Image (cartoon, coloured by chain):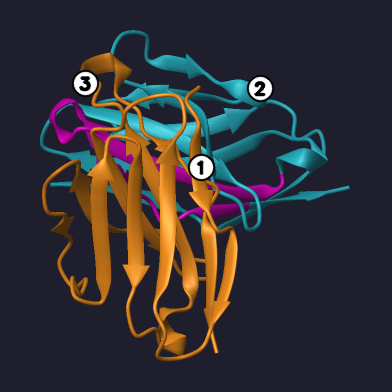
Amino acid sequence: AQSVTQLGSHVSVSEGALVLLRCNYSSSVPPYLFWYVQYPNQGLQLLLKYTTGATLVKGINGFEAEFKKSETSFHLTKPSAHMSDAAEYFCAVTSYSSASKIIFGSGTRLSIRP
Amino acid sequence: GAVVSQHPSRVICKSGTSVKIECRSLDFQATTMFWYRQFPKKSLMLMATSNEGSKATYEQGVEKDKFLINHASLTLSTLTVTSAHPEDSSFYICSASPGWTGSNTEAFFGQGTRLTVV
């Protein structure tokens, strides 16, 4: 079985500050990990994903995440927050054999203060 | 990336009626489609997995007679909410997978459908 835990349902940072959204996973098989962003009343947009290879993954809009197996973590970061980053962020997990059946975390709402 | 179109984006229906939501993969063949439900300020809950030409597999706690899923072709899956009640009001999102495995594993999401039952 697989699961994802996102620490902090709401994170607020100042514009220009570092963004850090935390995600820990549980998986009995090698995980594939994703971060998605959702704007109000819209679907999901893939920010980045980790499957194999390099553990530091760069995505769109300046976001990146690092897969740390020893810590079972996949935290999302961005060096400098922008007002347009305000949205809901979901960490998600699947595996090689799951045929894209993706399990989502509870989500973290990111607010940006001017 | 691949495009998944979900229709309608918003629907309001009367209690007791049925509503059909369509999910189409526009530029690829989707061997598998997934239906999720999202409650306000909550995460996405997987409802069911549908494979083209076979019966959908429902997650525990999801009423299969309430939420009818049909995956009749490689580009279309439909979710019908039967005898809708106000508690069925929610945001429904589909995703489609071309069946890649390995490092190409990915699912593409529709824009979602906001269902309001009055």
Residue A64, above or below A87: above
Q: Distance between the residues labelled 2 and 1?
A: 27 Å
Q: Write down the residue under mark 2.
A: A62
| Image quarter of residue A109 | bottom right
Where does the magenta region start and end? Answer: A86-109
Q: What residue type is labelled 1?
A: Ser
Residue B113, above or below A98: below
Q: What element carries label 2?
A: helix
Whether residue B48 is visible, yes or no, is yes
Kindly indicate which chain is depicted in orange in the rendered structure: B
| Residue farthest to the front, as pictured | B72
Query: In the picture provided, is A44 more to the left or to the right than A91?
Result: right
Whether residue A70 is visible, yes or no, is no
Neighbourhood count class around disc 3 (C-alpha, 10 Å): few under 14, some 14–19, many 20 upward: some
Q: Write down the residue under mark 1.
A: B5
Q: Write down the residue under mark 3.
A: B101
Kindly indicate which chain is depicted in cyan in the rendered structure: A
Q: What residue type is labelled 2?
A: Gly
In the foreground, B82 or A4: B82
